[in-house]
Amino acid sequence: MPANPLSAPSTAPVATSATRAAFLNVKAAAEYLGLSPHTLYVWRHRRQGPPSFRMGPRGRVMYRREALDAWIREQEQADSRSNTALNPVSATPRQRLSRTANA
């Protein structure tokens, strides 16, 4: 008796909830970052902001959740309020050159 084709395992990739959660469209990425979708579109146009790519036959703009998290960490490290090494108040004072030494 031939095997039932409906019960055969599919070779097509199955989109699990983990897979779907790994990729976010513009609206979901904007919500995740607390921004408007328009901001992400402008940043993408200016080649700023988190990395994105086009996916699928319609070329939808997508973001990897791990890339968004990495981008957030980069923003925290670039901000002197989050990174004490960049805080100008905690930097050692530099000695000024006297005006008479340059004249």
Image (cartoon, rainbow, N blue to C red):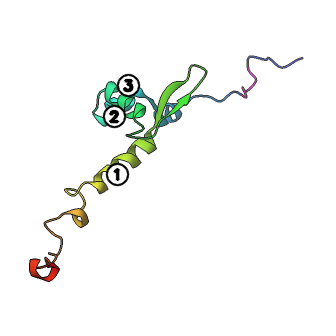
How many numbered marks appear?
3
Q: CA distance from mark 2 to mark 3?
A: 9 Å
* Residue on which the image places disc 2: 32
Q: Is residue 68 magenta?
A: no
Question: Which disc is residue 45 wearing?
Answer: none
Amino acid type, callout 1: Arg
Indicate the quadrant containing the C terminus: top left, top right, bottom left or bottom right. Answer: bottom left
Q: Residue at x 42, y 38 (%)?
A: 47
Q: Nearer the viewer, residue 92 or 53?
A: 92
- The stretch in magenta equals 7-11
Residue 9: quarter of image: top right
Residue 48: quarter of image: top left
* Residue on which the image places disc 1: 73
Q: Is residue 77 left or right of residue 93?
A: right
CA neighbours of label 3 inside 10 A, class few (<14), some (14 to 19), many (20+): some
Q: CA distance from mark 1 to mark 2?
A: 14 Å
Question: Which disc is residue 27 wearing?
Answer: 3
Q: Nearer the viewer, residue 3 or 51?
A: 51
